Image (cartoon, grey):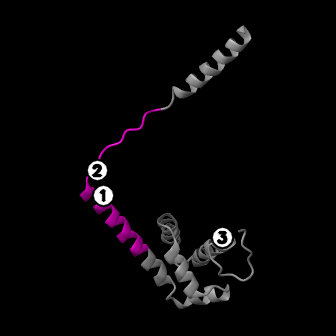
Amino acid sequence: MTRYRRTLATIVALAISHTVGLQAAQAGMIGTAEFTQSTLARAADSATRRAEINSLFERADVAQELARRGVDIGEARARVAALSDAELADMAKQIDEAPAGGDFLGVVVGIFLILLITDILGFTKIFPFTRSIR
């Protein structure tokens, strides 16, 4: 019985020692106006980013490169429309950080890879040479 109590005491002591570092979360109320304003700002930012990315498809060199890789521009536009805000922000960040004219191929490859991954995951069916894992 003492061995059981000693084991139980050790387990309880370890459990308590691991909870010492935890901190309680603090929450505060926000007003409706503040929430609405931040939501509208995020929606406007997302719409701007989508418009910027879609404007890239208007460029002849982008359209030619995507066609060369077998990507239909209409399907690429549909995929951009389906991107989440986080994915959209990541793509816009990659485009903004790309050197002007120097790493355009990197941007196109990035878009291609995003489309390829979503195709493999089964969210889209753009490329005929991929098989969905679903």
Q: Position of residue 42 (x, y in %)?
A: 37, 65
Q: Are marks 1 and 2 in contact (CB under 8 Å)?
A: yes
First of labels 3, 2 by sequence position? 2
Please identify the dominant SS of the magenta region: helix
Q: Position of residue 84 (x, y in %)?
A: 50, 67
Residue 56: x, y in percent? 50, 83
- CA distance separating discs 3 and 1: 34 Å
**Mark 3 or 1: the one toward you:** 1
Q: Quadrant of residue 24?
A: top left
Q: Amino acid at mark 2?
A: Ile
Residue 120 x %, y % = 69, 71
Crowding at mark 3 (Cα within 10 Å: few <14, some 14-19, many 20+): some
Query: Tag on residue 35?
Result: 1
Residue bounds of the magenta highlight: 23-49
Q: Secondary structure at mark 3?
A: helix
Residue tagged 3: 117
Going from N to C along the chain, the mark reached first, 3 or 1, is 1
The CA distance from mark 3 to mark 2 is 38 Å
Q: Which residue is mark 2?
A: 30
Who's the residue at 52% across and 74% down the image? 82
* Mark 3 or 2, closer to the camera: 2
Mark 3: amino acid: Ile
Residue occupying the point 60% across, 90% down: 64
29 relative to 4, above or below? below
Residue under the image location 57 percent in, 75 percent down:
107
Observer-nearest residue: 4 or 31? Answer: 4
Quadrant for residue 11, please give it. Answer: top right
Q: Is residue 38 above or below residue 88?
A: above
* Secondary structure category for the residue under label 2: loop
